[in-house]
Image (spheres, coloured by chain):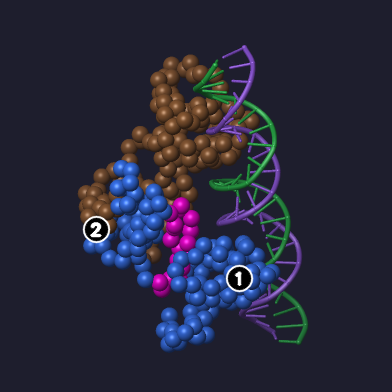
Chain colours: A brown, B blue, C green, D purple
Amino acid sequence: MATDPTPGRGRAAEAPLRDRLRQRGRRVTLQREAIMQVLRGCAGHIAADDVYRRLREEFPQINRSTVYRTLHTLEELGLVRHTHDETGAPRYHHAEDPPHVHLVCRGCGGLTAVDELPVLEQLVASLRDRYGFAADPTHFPIAGTCAQCRGRRG
Amino acid sequence: MATDPTPGRGRAAEAPLRDRLRQRGRRVTLQREAIMQVLRGCAGHIAADDVYRRLREEFPQINRSTVYRTLHTLEELGLVRHTHDETGAPRYHHAEDPPHVHLVCRGCGGLTAVDELPVLEQLVASLRDRYGFAADPTHFPIAGTCAQCRGRRG
DNA sequence: CAACTTCTTGCGACGTGTTGCATGAGGGAC
DNA sequence: GTCCCTCATGCAACACGTCGCAAGAAGTTG
């Protein structure tokens, strides 16, 4: 891939990737830049295979395992994170996306995003006090049954 | 459901399966009984594919998709449940196993089982009040970093 | 017990994710 | 620019999980 001349997404955004790769003795490759580009241009969460499919349109020779391995690498570098959807499948997102918790209904599959919940912070504090455990409650969703599905049958 | 008076694993334990299947117009098959038997004889959580592998020793002709479909069926009947491990992969267990939450460390993979945590109940109550959402905090683990891994690098 | 209905199973193919290995490319030294 | 070392990529094969379909079996009716 050539460098990106587009005005919308400035090339300055690519610096963190190059810097972090070099800091750790890893290499800067076209594939890594392209994959990071997809994550940057993606509003919410995205499945690894969707990243692969998007890239194939532009780079038909790119390999699935390169995409999967690169996502792990970018996560190690702290540029990308993943959470899990309602089935437990991984979903990737840019590391700077604001954190939030998902409530997922096992009846209808409905999703609710929760940005703030004081009790959640109390839970995190309690786990830190009792177990020395630094919890990240955004990594997995919280499963349950939504109001509508509760009303419907139980 | 009939109570099971057998101390070991008596055949009375099979009655709930047959009853529930018939109640819903589903059929009683050897495969279903064998799969339920594996879950009953399994202390903790088990991967679907491990159920399959165990059954193959006794029933070499059994098919992988039968096992997967049957686990879903047994879950519909309320006899089996699944949670998710630290990678998000499903883990099955007998429905009567006592519920608990898993803390999973993303550094070392270490697991801590939490039986009681008052703040967790407050969280469940809060989600019910604010969203009408009946949360099951045992379904997904809580990801984070354990005390040792925090000390090591962070 | 024989016929019939329809649920279940086994099979094959596919989707998503991982791994081992040979080839290819990044980047440092000169 | 060239050499060289090592990392990264592409490929092929595998592991786990799902789906559509035809054959088989559970259970019902007479």
Q: Find residue B29 and report its image quarter.
A: bottom right
Front position in the image: B23 or B49: B49
Q: Is residue A119 one of those drawn in magenta?
A: no
Height in image: B98 above or below B147? below
Front position in the image: C12 or B7: B7
Q: Which residue is mark 1?
A: B55
Q: Indicate the secondary structure of the residue bearing disc 1.
A: helix
Pointer 1 local density, CA inside 10 Å: few below 14, some 14–19, many at least 20: many
Q: Residue at left 59%, top 66%?
A: B52
> Is the N terminus of chain B in the top left, top right, bottom left or bottom right quadrant?
bottom left
Q: Find residue A65 and report its image quarter.
A: top right
Front position in the image: B11 or A19: A19
Q: Residue at left 37%, top 71%?
A: B98
Q: Is residue B85 one of those drawn in magenta?
A: yes
Does any portion of residue A50 appear in the rendered image? no
Q: Which residue is mark 2?
A: A130
Height in image: B138 above or below B152? below
Amino acid type, label 2: Arg
Question: Do marks 1 and 2 share a chain?
Answer: no
Q: Position of residue D6 (x, y in %)?
A: 55, 33
Q: Chain of mark 1?
A: B
Q: Indicate the secondary structure of the residue bearing disc 2.
A: helix
Amino acid type, label 1: Leu
Q: Residue at left 33%, top 46%?
A: B152
